[in-house]
Amino acid sequence: MRALVVDHSRPSGVRLAEAPEPVPAADEVMVRVGAFALNNGDLATVDGSADGTVPGWEAAGHVVRAAADGSGPAVGTPVTTFGGDGGWAEFRAVGTGLLGTAPDGADLASISTVPVAASSALRALRRSGSTLGRRIMVTGATGGVGRYAIQLARLGGALPVAVTRSPERYGDELRDLGAGAVVADPADYGDTVHTVIDTVGGSLLVRAFDRLENRGVLIALGHLATEDEVFPRGALMADPRRHDRTVVSFHQFDGAPLPPDFTWLSGQLAHGVLRPSIAWRGSWEQADDAIAAMRHGTLHGKAVVVTG
């Protein structure tokens, strides 16, 4: 089968090659992959893997062999899948607990973005509690997680506040996704917020924490920044306006069942309630271009390789 395999001699870290087809375990289905998404975490996996490894966290396609133990969807079902590797290939063997189904005719490129970006945003918002009527700040708003977080927060009745380094460039687009305000820095927002979904870390996290209102929560979801988080003296002191604020760590795969969330999110995409915000869509042969853009930080949104 065709696959992108790790090759540290290449600038992208991968090359298109032939690889052995996976052999499913009893509780795994075989999926013919129609599209797979690229993530910054994938690139970290590439950097730390041996040559010849097939990387790839999330991929979507159709089941071509059902699980031998009878669990999971039937042959022909469109699915979106997650795993620690193996997604950047024509075929993927995946456990039935690591996939969600999608409506017939769903765009595979769109639903390939569900397992990491959309699911992270959904679960982070759940951690914040009720969203109805609350202001929710999203840092790194032009990224895949950020764009989903804005849409899901608005869908939940919140006022999303988008933080991006280039509000003049992306402001209209982020407002169209549901942002009620777009600012270049958390300090530029003149009000407090109940929740911060931070996908950046570093000093931006510290400044975003300063925007929290009483009983507000900052969810540390991503760590793209290379600098440390250093809180200035007094930043954690309470006063009548800033009491009982919380910073929580976040891990998407915390043991809660994945299939219901993957399936619901895929349905929202298929029915046009959510938009995948795919910034780059290309073929196997063009994957190097997307990886280069991601490594240089110039790709804002999701990158998807369509295999068909």
Image (spheres, rainbow, N blue to C red):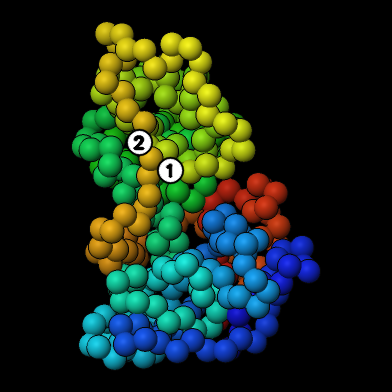
Q: Is residue 67 visible?
A: yes
Among the 4 quarters of the image, the one containing residue 217: top left
Q: Residue at x 35, y 22 (%)?
A: 212
| Percent x, y of residue 39 | 54, 58
Picture residue at 62% right of the left edge, 38% below the top: 226
**Tag 2, which secondary structure?**
strand
Please state which amino acid type lies under the numbered disc 1: Leu
Query: Where residue 153 sits: x, y (%)?
Result: 32, 41
**Is 260 drawn above or below residue 307 in the view shown?**
above
The quadrant the C terminus occupies is bottom right
Residue 48's place in the image compared with 16, above or below, is: above
82, 229: nearer the viewer: 229
Residue that carries the numbered disc 2 in the rendered image: 248
Residue 303 visible at all = no
Q: Tell me the crowding category of disc 1: few under 14, some 14 to 19, or many 20 or more residues within 10 angstroms, Cα based.
A: many
Gap in Å between the C-alphas at discs 2 and 1?
9 Å
Q: Residue at x 54, y 51 (%)?
A: 301
| Left or right for 72, reference 21 | left
Q: Which mark is residue 221?
A: 1
